[in-house]
Image (spheres, grey):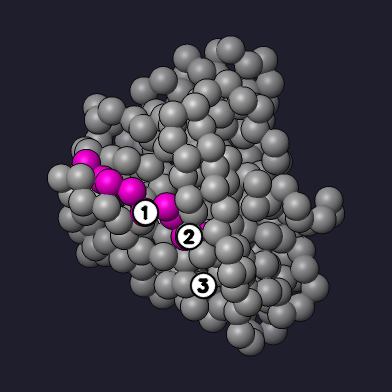
């Protein structure tokens, strides 16, 4: 019941910058492998923090991959460097989107999933900024390409965003109009969003508006859960919801402990 760690990070090159990702931690399935989910940490955190929690969940058929974001200057902190999936200066619908950083992290996640066996269901989940990448990846999947136009290579069967928001929400509908397959794909991909009403880091309204943007763009299989009194952290009630939702939507064998 220990997690295995990859010893090397990997780089992702875009037109302007090269991003060096940190250490990746892997939680192996304890029973028959049915699904692989990349789980993304929040701003300033690392993959090992979440791998330890995910290992305790009663989901023995899931392999969890927990990468660590690159260390980069973050505008929100006045340019101070920390682990971040993309640069962010203002967490709001009106703030500028770091499309280059978003695409690099989404591509890194897709690359991690692309080597999984063909019969394994694939998913992406995350907390806070990690949730932002998970939701952004969902839009890339249904449109079929990243924001930079490169093809998105993997099929997603589940997307989870805890205490997060959707980057590029203002341009989502315009991007979808370029793809005939986007509406059909959007209707089929399951998404779970959870947000605390007392979140003082990523305000509840940003999570709610993100869910509304996804729904209006055609994401019909979206569940939005609200937690009264929950701040910017997770609680057992929320992780229980995640376990139940994944078990149902991925058709997982139920753990005897669940």
Q: What stretch is highlighted in magenta?
A: 67-76
Q: In this view, does 180 lie above or below 16?
A: above
User: Badge 1 local density, few (<14 within 10 Å), some, or many (20+)?
Assistant: some
Q: What residue would you read off at disc 2?
A: 22
Of pointers 3 and 2, the one earlier in the residue sequence: 2
Name the residue at 83% across, 51% down.
Answer: 118
Name the residue at 72% across, 65% down.
Answer: 252
Q: In this view, does 63 lie above or below 133?
A: below
Q: Tell me residue 45's x, y (percent).
A: 36, 64
Name the residue at 75% across, 52% down.
Answer: 115
Q: How far apart are marks 3 and 2 (CA)?
A: 14 Å
**Mark whose residue sits in front, 1 or 3:** 1
Q: Is residue 4 above or below residue 227?
A: below
Residue closest to the eye, 213 or 146: 146
User: Badge 3 local density, few (<14 within 10 Å), some, or many (20+)?
Assistant: many
Q: Which mark is residue 71?
A: 1
Q: What residue would you read off at disc 3?
A: 51
């Amino acid at each position: 019941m220990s997690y295995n760690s990859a010893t090397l990070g990997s780089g992702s090159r875009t037109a302007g910058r090269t991003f060096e990702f940190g250490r990746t931690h892997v939680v192996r399935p304890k029973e028959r492998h049915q699904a692989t989910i990349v789980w993304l940490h929040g701003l300033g955190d690392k993959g090992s923090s979440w791998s330890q929690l995910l290992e305790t969940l009663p989901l023995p058929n899931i392999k969890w991959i927990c990468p660590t974001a690159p260390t980069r200057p973050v505008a929100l902190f006045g340019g101070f460097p920390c682990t971040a999936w993309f640069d962010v200066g203002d967490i709001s619908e009106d703030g500028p989107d770091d499309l280059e950083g978003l695409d690099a992290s989404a591509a890194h996640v897709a690359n991690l999933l692309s080597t999984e066996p063909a019969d394994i269901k694939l998913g992406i989940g995350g907390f806070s900024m990690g949730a932002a990448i998970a939701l952004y990846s969902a839009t890339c999947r249904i449109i079929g390409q990243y924001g930079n136009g490169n093809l998105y290579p993997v099929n997603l069967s589940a997307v989870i965003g805890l205490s997060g928001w959707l980057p590029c929400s203002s341009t989502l509908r315009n991007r979808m109009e370029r793809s005939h397959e986007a509406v059909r794909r959007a209707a089929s991909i399951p998404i779970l969003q959870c947000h605390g009403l007392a979140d003082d880091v990523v305000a509840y309204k940003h999570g709610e508006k993100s869910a509304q943007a996804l729904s209006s763009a055609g994401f019909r299989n979206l569940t939005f859960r609200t937690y009264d009194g929950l701040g910017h952290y997770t609680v057992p009630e929320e992780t229980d919801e995640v376990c139940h939702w994944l078990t149902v939507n991925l058709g997982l064998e139920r753990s005897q402990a669940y």
